[in-house]
Amino acid sequence: MISVVISTHNDERTLGDVMGALVAAAVDALVREVIVVDAGSSDQTLEIADDAGARIIKSAGPEGIAQGCALAKGDWLLILDAKTTPPLRWENAVLDHVRSHSGEAGWWTAKPGRWPFGAKGPKTVLIPRSLYAAGSGAPVGRRIRFAR
């Protein structure tokens, strides 16, 4: 159902937590694949990604994210920055969004930062493959809310 595309660059300290947050969703078949798009890491980032079974693409910037999304097989794309671990029970909020807003992108952020696309904005984007493929630019979408 969901292909996760993670942008990395020397993220050995945070990538394990991000990958760990995906495990339950992978067991439940919500996450079908993980693609790591690496911008030239010189630390253990690629080893962590490989050990976790992720597909690795070596490419930087928005072009790398676009390559990862083009290779993804899921109906939905979850684009993450490796410095932003999905919050506890993120899967429930994402499933709710997929069921209730099937044609719309969604987003969340733990703190202000950059889009995976490079502009200022949310750290995480959930977007239907069809909407991403339409190439309408950075998605606006709905903010994904989490139960407290």
Image (spheres, grey):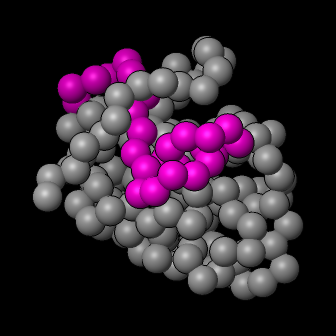
Is residue 27 in view from this perspective?
no
Q: Quadrant of the C terminus?
A: bottom left
Question: In this orientation, does residue 112 appear?
Answer: yes
Principal secondary structure, stretch drawn in magenta: loop
Name the residue rendered at 32%, 62% in the picture. Answer: 87
> Which residue lies most toward the front here?
112
Whether residue 118 appears in magenta in the rendering, the answer is yes
* Residue at 41% across, 25% down: 141
Please state the horizontal and vertical placement of residue 55, each as a whole percent of the image.
Answer: 66, 60
Q: Quadrant of the N terminus?
A: top left
Which is more toward the observer, 60 or 146?
146
Q: Which one is in front, 32 or 145? A: 145
The image quarter containing residue 9 is bottom right
Residue 93 higher or lower than 6, as above or below: above
Lateral position of residue 139 relative to residue 99, left or right: right
Name the image quarter holding residue 40. Answer: bottom right
Q: Verify whether residue 21 appears in magenta.
A: no
Residue 86 vs residue 48, the one in the foreground: 86
- Residue 127 on image: x %, y %: 47, 32
Image-based side of 119 in relation to 97, left or right? right
Residue at 46% x, 57% y is 111
Query: Quadrant location of residue 29?
Result: bottom left
Residue drawn 69% across the image and 63% down it: 8
Above or below, comparing residue 106 to residue 78 in the picture:
above
Magenta-highlighted residues: 99-124
Residue at the farthest left position: 148
